[in-house]
Amino acid sequence: MINTKQKPKARILSLEGCAKADRLFMESLRPDLEIELVNPIDELSGEADRLPISERYYWTEDSEVEAIVRRLTRKEHFDLVIIGNNKGAGLRKAACVKPSMRAASVVILWNSFGYRDTKPYENMGYTHFCTRDQYSKFLECCLTRKFGEVKREK
């Protein structure tokens, strides 16, 4: 007998890292969910394609990423938005996210808490912050809050 029951879908906007690796990581945490991961890097073309992935988000001051983030967060629903601070470059991306999403649906990531200034993000309405070391636990908590406990296939 074929199981035709569809998995619940989690829509996640990642403004951090590599989309394929992020999706695989999230699917390993929650195999009971269909993860739809949107990453603006995937939509970039031209000059940004030739840059190392770590530099693609800040290749110009008025970047294509910011326009894509504005468009996506105003027109589409996301269960979670992930923004890397990346030496302050995350502030420009964070400013582009629709204000009504900021407090409940967004997490700002740091490499460590040794140097972090959350005040500029808090002033924009952001409330969730964690290090990359805490990220998997935070992500698991967010997805559990939204979709319930992991449902393992028998």
Image: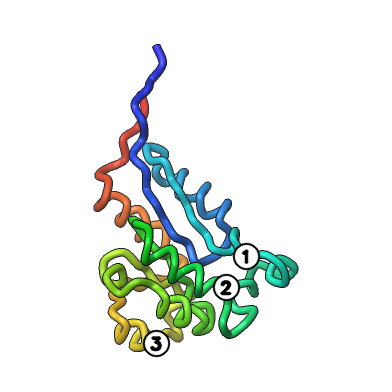
Q: Quadrant of the C terminus?
A: top left
How far across and down, in percent of the image, does residue 122 sit?
30, 83
Residue 102 relative to residue 133: left or right: left
Q: Identify the secondary structure beneath mark 2.
A: helix
Residue drawn at x 35%, y 32% is: 152
* Identity of the residue drawn at 58% across and 85% down: 61
Residue at mark 3: 117
For this rendering, which residue is in front, 60 or 16? 60
* Looking at the image, residue 113 lies above or below residue 74: below
Q: How is the image coloured?
A: rainbow
- Give the distance between the C-alpha atoms of the residues marked 1 and 3, in whole angstroms: 29 Å
Determine which of the numbered discs, if any, sits on residue 64 in the image: 2
| Coordinates of residue 27 in the picture (x, y in percent) | 46, 44
The residue identified by callout 1 is 44
Residue 108, placed above or below residue 12: below
Q: Nearer the viewer, mark 3 or mark 2?
A: 2
Residue in front for this viewpoint, 3 or 63: 63
For the residue marked with disc 2, what is the amino acid? Answer: Glu
